Image: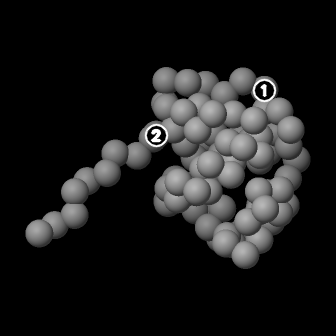
Amino acid sequence: MGRARIDRPQKLSDKLLKIRQSLGLSQNGLIAALGLLDLLTQAEISAFEQGKRVPPLIVLLHYARAFKVHVDDLIDDEIDLGPVKT
């Protein structure tokens, strides 16, 4: 049995990068702001922002809560992020 293909949101990586850059955070600063120092590395954030990896659901939830957006806003390619709030 093979693994089923998983559709990835095409704009997710751009949205995650936009959030971080609009807040003026480094990748390590983002990890701290998300409260995930023990869970994520800078290399993982880089992979998320380059579209090489999709963040785990719990990480997306932390992004959404920390930056006051809905998880739908992150994963739905038809939704553009407005100004990022802190």
Label 2, on which residue? 10
Q: Residues within 10 Å of mark 2 (few under 14, many from 20)?
A: few
Q: Quadrant of the N terminus?
A: bottom left
Judged from the image, the secondary structure of the residue bearing numbered disc 1 is loop
Q: Is residue 71 visible?
A: yes
Label 1, on which residue? 83
Which residue is painted at 85% across and 43% down in the image? 23
Judged from the image, the secondary structure of the residue bearing numbered disc 2 is loop
The three-letter amino acid code for the residue at tag 1 is Pro
Q: Residues within 10 Å of mark 1 (few under 14, many from 20)?
A: few
Q: Which mark is residue 2?
A: none
- Left or right: 6 as drawn, with respect to 44: left
Foreground mark, 2 or 1, reads: 1
The three-letter amino acid code for the residue at tag 2 is Gln
Q: Position of residue 44 (x, y in %)?
A: 62, 67
Eyeballing the image, is 42 above or below 25? below
Judging depth in this view, the residue of 84 and 72 nearest the camera is 72
Q: Position of residue 72 (x, y in %)?
A: 54, 33
Q: Earlier in the sequence, mark 2 or mark 1?
A: 2
Residue furthest bottom in the image = 38
